């Protein structure tokens, strides 16, 4: 079965600094990969997803992620973080028409 | 289009009581998921339905938990009897397998506290 690892439980960055959140997956074939964001007290909102094609995908709120098959990674990036980006970020992996497995999440704190 | 709708949004109940959480998936979606989120265990998949049929219930913690999907527009997750360790946020999510490319859409969650 597919699985996903987010090695960083908590990251703190200064507002305006760049951000990279790490995600590694385990799956026998090319998976479907997702990043979701969860603000406090809210549900999960899809930021972006990768199925095939261009390995650099653009999402909402200025986020992007790059699929690297050789590293089994799908890291999330943003060139300049805003205070409103403070939230919990989840990487997820799914096989076609199968369930979705989530990483443990990375909590992002943004310093003024 | 309305998103995934869950009720109740918040519930506080006493240990031993029965709890029923409800979910209305997005119209036209044929897969439905129940997840539980806690600080200790993160997001756990409890059960997954496809076309109203349970496909994988290996995440259901124990017999006190049961889930049903009597039709394409409604599902319930029941805990009987409830225990304090069941306190968590329970998310329902749905997916349209053929058209949305496996994107799962989440409801806003049901926040359960068992005292």
Image: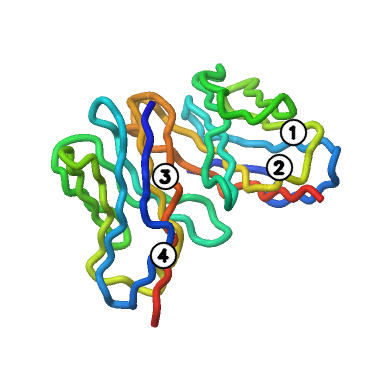
Q: Which residue does the image show at 47% across and 50% down from the upper left? A: A44
Q: Is residue A36 left or right of residue B16?
A: left
Q: How far apart in space, not on screen, are marks 3 and 1 (Cα)?
A: 25 Å
Q: Which residue does the image show at 79% across and 38% down from the upper left? A: B82
The mark found on residue B21 in the picture is none
- For mark 4, what is the residue? A108
Q: How far apart in space, not on screen, are marks 2 and 4 (Cα)?
A: 27 Å
Q: Which SS class for mark 3?
A: loop
Residue under mark 3: which chain is it in? A
Q: Which residue does the image show at 35% across and 37% down from the upper left? A: A93
Q: Which SS class for mark 2?
A: helix
User: Relative to the observer, which residue lies in front, B98 or A94?
Assistant: A94
Give the quadrant of residue A81: bottom left
User: Mark 2 or mark 1, which has the lower sequence index?
Assistant: 1
- For mark 1, what is the residue? B79
| Neighbour tally class for label 3: few under 14, some 14-19, many 20 plus, Cα within 10 Å | many
The mark found on residue B86 in the picture is 2
The mark found on residue A103 in the picture is 3
């Amino acid at each position: 079965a597919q699985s996903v690892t987010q090695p960083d439980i908590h990251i703190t960055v200064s507002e305006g600094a760049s951000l990279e959140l790490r995600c590694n997956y385990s799956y026998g074939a090319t998976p479907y990969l997702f990043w979701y964001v969860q603000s406090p007290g809210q549900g999960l909102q899809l930021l972006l997803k990768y199925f095939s094609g261009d390995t650099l995908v653009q999402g909402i709120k200025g986020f992007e992620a790059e699929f690297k098959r050789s590293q089994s990674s799908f890291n999330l990036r943003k060139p300049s973080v805003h205070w409103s980006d403070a939230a919990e970020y989840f990487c997820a992996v799914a096989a076609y028409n199968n369930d979705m497995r989530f990483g443990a999440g990375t909590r992002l704190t943004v310093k003024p | 289009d309305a998103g995934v709708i869950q009720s109740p949004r918040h519930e506080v109940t006493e240990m031993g009581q029965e709890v029923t959480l409800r979910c209305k998936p997005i119209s036209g979606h044929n897969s439905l998921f129940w997840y539980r989120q806690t600080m200790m265990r993160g997001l756990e998949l409890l059960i997954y339905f496809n076309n109203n049929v349970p496909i994988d219930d290996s995440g259901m913690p124990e017999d006190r938990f049961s889930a049903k999907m009597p039709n394409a527009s409604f599902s319930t997750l029941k805990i009987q009897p409830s225990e304090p360790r069941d306190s968590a946020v329970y998310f329902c999510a749905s997916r349209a397998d053929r058209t949305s490319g496996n994107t799962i859409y989440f409801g806003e969650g049901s926040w359960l506290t068992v005292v």
